[in-house]
Amino acid sequence: MADIHFDHHIALRVADLGVDCLRINPGNITREDRLREVIAKARDLNIPIRIGVNAGSLGKDLLRKYSEPTAEAMVESAMRNVELLDKYDFQDFKVSVKASDIFMAVAAYRDLAGRIEQPLHLGITEAGGLRSGTVKSAIGLGALLLDGIGDTVRISLAADPVEEAKVAWDMLRSLRLRSKGINFIACPSCSRQNFDVIQTVNELESRLEDITVPMDVSIIGCIVNGPGEAKESDFGLTGGTPSNLVYIDGVPDHKIENDDLVNELEKQIRAKAAAKEIQMAKDEKNLIVKV
């Protein structure tokens, strides 16, 4: 994915070098003749284009018209390029209208969703650091995804890009749009817990990131909510005295002590994940045979 600004010759060059997609910023590549060259190159090489509008780099004429970045200004910027692509009969594109302000971005995407049929690439741009940016992204993109708006997402954090991908996956998994990996259900710290829930869950999340089979794992420190959550999980742990109780597929299975708890849980969760993966493969094979 090549992110192109100001100089359209760069877009032409990287297209020849084999990029998979071109992002064009309408705010700083505005001349129609230059955009026409990019469109022609993209058509010749079968490369899709993303019209990438950003509140921080709107065209000067739009800033004069609206005085400041607004949702309306971003949508107008996007539609100018959509109409240009339509003019040259190029339909292999998607659009983003990103802003660091949640309300502006959500309003722009909702407006744009009613105007075009092409895919929308969602993002709260320059959202901030790991914690604050995650919260802003979850609120803004979550609201849009719950409305059925959006086809691809980018989480923009001032953090390791790996964290961006993790946050995106967790967001999609929470909205049940994706089902890859473990969905942890865990309680906060309180006086009822029979083991250190926070340390246990953080350790397990870190150790079990490689598991891709979809699973619900509940780690609850006491018997108040523990059994109820465990009965709805693939693997559940309910804190108890003197021993904690493990549930498998919602059914009480065996007890486990606090000694070496994380290592034991990791081993048992991995075993359950392997068993579930085998069962899923069998179910898929049987479905294919029936069809």
Image (spheres, rainbow, N blue to C red):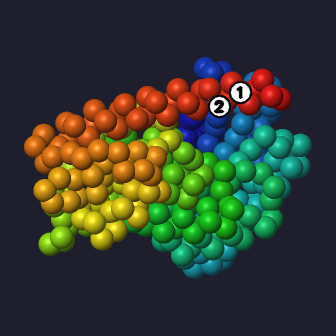
Instruction: From the top left corner, tell me how far across and down residue 156 is, in percent.
Output: 44, 53
Quarter location, residue 165: top left
Q: Which residue is mark 1?
A: 286
Q: CA distance from mark 2 to mark 1?
A: 5 Å
Where 273 falls versus 81 (above or below)?
above
Q: Quadrant of the C terminus?
A: top right
- Residue at the image point whose x is 51% and y is 30% from the top: 277
Q: 213 or 11: which is nearer to us?
A: 213
Residue depicted at 46% across the width and 46% down the height: 249
Q: Give me the residue at 43% from left, 29% from top.
A: 274
Q: Amino acid at mark 1?
A: Asn
Give x and y (percent) for residue 252: 36, 50
Is 194 situated left or right of 90 in this image? left
Q: Position of residue 17 (x, y in %)?
A: 61, 20
Mark 2 element type: helix
* Residue at the disc numbered 2: 283
What residue appears at the point 53 percent right and 26 percent down from the top-left corner? 278
10 Å crowding of disc 2: few (<14), some (14-19), many (20+): few
- Would residue 288 be found to the left or right of residue 25 on screen? right
